[in-house]
Amino acid sequence: MLTSMAFAPLSVTEALQQPLQCTETALLLEITTAAPNTDVIFRVFPTPDPGPVFFMSTPLLEHHTLPPFSAIKPEHVKPAIEELLNLNKRRIRELLEGFAETEDTPLWNTLVEPMADWSDELSQAWSPVGHLNGVMNSDELREAYNACLPLLSQYYTEMGQNEALFRAYEALAESEHFDTLSTAQKTAIQHELRDFRLSGVDLPPAKKERYAEIQQQLSKLTSKFSENVLDATGAWSKHITDVSELDGVPESGLGLLKQQAQQKELDGYVITLDFPSYMPVMSYGTNRSLREELYTAFVTRASDIGPNGGEFDNSQNLKDIMALRYELATLLGFENYAEYSVATKMAQSGQEVIDFLNDLAGKAKPQAEREFAELKAYAADELGLTDLKPWDVTFAAEKLRQARYSISQEDIRPYLPVNTVIKGMFEVVSRLYSVEFVEQTEFDTYHPDARFFHVMKDGQQIAAFYLDLYARAKKRGGAWMDDCRVRRRTSDGLQLPVAYLVCNFSPAVGETPALLTHDEMTTLFHEFGHGLHHMMTQIDVSAVSGINGVAWDAVELPSQFMENWCYEPEALAFLSGHYQTGEPLPQELLDKLLAAKNFQSAMMTMRQLEFALFDFRLHREYSTENPVTAEQILGEVREQVTVVPTVEFNRFQHGFTHIFAGGYAAGYYSYKWAEVLSADAYSRFEEEGIFNPDTGASFLKEILSQGGSREAAELFENFRGRKPSVEPLLRHSGIDIPEVA
């Protein structure tokens, strides 16, 4: 949820509702996917200035150092947001009137600082609402949340198209005062001017009005798209009383399915479409018809067909979103939405993105085809699956992995109890950046699963974060990082950054603690990487602090970078410990894990390229004159890059929330783009030592601490000493470059 004073070129839902998500990709399956010192404070709302705006009594408008989750009720939401929006409109109007009357040139402290203060107040009211909507969804909260979207859309549109406000920023940028500002301050102003233009500030009145209408509609449509996926996922379940139908499913999976049945006051087992429930059956269940049933339900979610066909259908929402995005882009003078999206990214053009994806596909596809041929032959010869179907692929792949490497995710799970992994992850970060983590036992929470930590450096608190790890009903699937508070300098001191870190892992079952697969541990490291990017920043200007202002195709660098330590023997020695004995991961299992690291990595690369090419091509090729469908583009992309079987009824696009309800529209390529950066950045650690404190200090200084204050390319080159190379990614992925050159 990247809320800042910038008027980003996104719908309001995308601008205010875009947590940094992991790819949530299982192999070949579809994705939904201590008190501070006196100068360091958590920012609290100042007492609203008196005037004609009436403030109701609501926790969202009161003074709080952290969100008052337990006190927030749905009925508080809309009135609080309305109050703050009205107050901000009045404040801005009076500010601009003052400049007009005095004819004074706007300065940083007379224009930007008050705007940042007011934006932060609004963010601190809206952030906990958005978070609760994702992790504790209810009909009442959803209604309140959705009621605010049009209000926020209108507000941000009005601000982005406020010519007087734009001219004030222009005057500041052209003044002598501008030359006295810090690099971060200058960047914030430059981004602001860019985003004004991308919000249509220069449009004639009629087009401004249409821009506002489009943003209003997009805010509703993208929110509805997300809701449909959540509701469709929750609507399907399968009750099983005969355990023989679950043959092959490991004890950890059976325990979860049994626990889910008990929660519904049923005997036996209940399977849902949540990943911790779904994946054990798809990976290990020998019942082929059951796998087919689950697969069908999963890939037809929120569509016109399947078990709940038509009930939560995103077909029209998808079409309407595409039409409106194209109209929005052309209204602003762009050829298509992809070029509009690239305007704020590291890539210089849409063609550069296409060339990057096609080049990577060309390098990876031959090996991916060989990998699939091996899988197909194994499935036929050893499993009797002569006609390999999509619902067989994950099952067969897991069997082949076990046959080739004598290891499965379940073999490792007992050695990865969640608390051991968390402690080990903290140790990794401590060695790299000399920080400590202190868990807090007393804080205002929204659910018993949520935990809260302070981040300490040299005895001083520098940040904090919430950790919410387990899947549950009414919680959005996937994994993501969101900002709760942003680091910024205020008149009261320094506001510290606070993050939300959310996953959907299997919870504890009975007396057995929550145990992670290695893939889940990697996901946790990924999201923690996002969190570190937000929390370790040293930039005090909110618009470019932490993850704010970072080019979207570079924002995945710190997250993917952190994943590397999950494969380092030196790190795994303290990341693992058997939940019963404390024994670290045995050398034999470690050797097998490392040997299997790149198992079918080329196939996975092609799968991610399928998502990225589909997203970018759809947003690049769609036009009113050429209203290509998602189905058409997806079919063409699959013909180009897919090496695994597909079925006609697959409706993957109907659940692709990353691009139709999040911040990744014409931007999903960012995962692969940033993966190049992260692999190359990590190669320096490989050269100098994975726990080399000087190398860690350099990454902290040049990447993590800088936020969006400088261009991503400049920051990378400062750290690596050169431009990025794709070779480390191919090497890390086990893709044989000479064979595909």
Image (spheres, grey):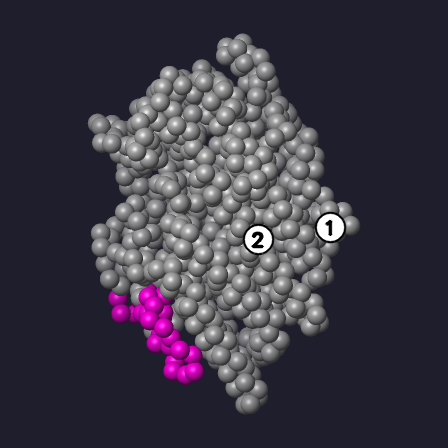
Residue closest to the eye, 245 or 546: 245
Q: Magenta stretch?
A: 37-63
Q: Name the residue carrying label 1.
A: 623
Residue furthest right in the image: 625
- Residue 635 locus on image (x, y percent): 68, 34
Per the model, the C-alpha gap separating discs 1 and 2 is: 19 Å
Q: Give the label on residue 221, or none.
A: 2
Q: Is residue 442 left or right of residue 702?
A: left
Q: Amino acid at mark 2?
A: Leu
Hey, which quadrant is residue 69 in on the image? Answer: bottom left
Q: Is residue 664 left or right of residue 269?
A: right
Is 62 covered by the magenta stretch?
Answer: yes
Hey, which quadrant is residue 121 in on the image? Answer: bottom left
Question: Mark 2: which secondary structure?
Answer: helix
Question: Majority secondary structure of the magenta segment?
Answer: loop
- Residue 118 locus on image (x, y percent): 44, 72
**Residue 713 visible somewhere in the drawing:** no
